[in-house]
Amino acid sequence: MSRAPKPLRVVAELGRPETPQETADRLAENSRKYRSHKTVNNLVLSLLVTVGAVLVLVLLVPRNDNPITRDIDYASIAAQTQPVVGHALASPVLPVDWSANDAEWRAGTNGQVPSWYIGLLTPDNQYIGFNQAFDANPTWLAQKLPDSPVVDTVSIAGVTWDVYRNSAAAADRGNFDYALVTTAGTSTYVLIGTASTGDFETLATALAPNVAENAAE
């Protein structure tokens, strides 16, 4: 006994049965939508797995919340540089809770003023930049202390220093709040930074022997 033919599917939108081509097109579109949806799901799953792996690494890797600072042995750098300099380079002996984050000889090429620089950090993490320039001119000093006249003089460990204060707005001062300047022989010493006057005095006292040595030349 033969089976009755399967009734054709009536599509509500068409109001009539689908043609074979319309059926084929509908099935193909459904298949495309399924594959597209599956691809999106796979991408989301892959992203979640990646984020999870990163979080695991972050949790497993030990972290140090302390700021990273360099501690430069400026005394060794001064000793290495001294043979090429005709005058005694300063290497101040400071308390153990001071540190340096930079030290370099600036040769002064192309007509610039040669100088010895140390970047110092005080116990409360304030900055004092030390410069010992040789045969410095007013232009060099003005560049270090822009628009800042001498406001006072102080005597520290037998050395007279000119005092400078930055008169600019606090937001525009950078690393220059206060400065001390003195000259001995061909050396001009500039201490400039954000530290307290007490810390400046500590550094100036440590520099006094070198100032006296260069003054005697």
Image (tube, rainbow, N blue to C red):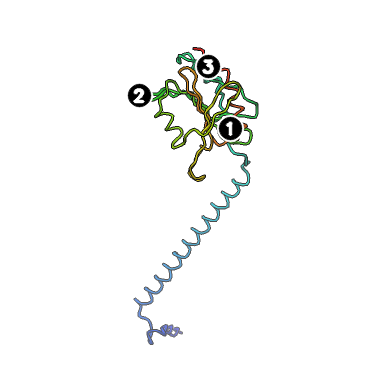
Tag 3 or tag 2, which sits nearer the N-term?
A: 3
Q: In this view, does 45 lie above or below 210?
A: below
Q: Quadrant of residue 97?
A: top right
Of 63 and 185, the residue lying toward us: 185
- Of label 1 and label 3, which has the lower sequence position? 3
Question: Do we see residue 102 in this rendering?
Answer: no
Q: Which mark is residue 79?
A: 3
Q: Which residue is drawn at 47% across and 13% down?
A: 83
The crowd level at tag 2 (other Cα within 10 Å; few <14, some 14-19, many 20+) is few
Q: Position of residue 49 (x, y in %)?
A: 55, 53
Residue 121 x %, y % = 58, 32
Of residues 168 and 176, which is closer to you in this image? Answer: 168
Task: Provide the residue designation for mark 2.
Answer: 111
Amino acid of disc 2: Gly
Find residue 29 and report its horizontal and vertical position in percent.
40, 71
Q: Is mark 2 on a helix, strand or loop?
A: loop
Three-letter amino acid code at disc 1?
Leu
In this view, the residue in front, 202 or 116, is 202
Where residue 205 sits, quadrant-wise, is top right
Q: Which of marks 2 and 1 is in front?
A: 2
Of all residues, the one furthest to the top in this rendering is 217
Q: Distance between the residues labelled 2 and 3?
A: 25 Å
**Residue 188 visible in this rendered orientation of the protein:** yes
Which residue carries the number 1 mark?
121
Question: Closer to the N terminus: mark 2 or mark 1?
Answer: 2
How far is the residue under mark 1 from the one under mark 3?
21 Å
Residue that sits furthest to the front in the current view: 152
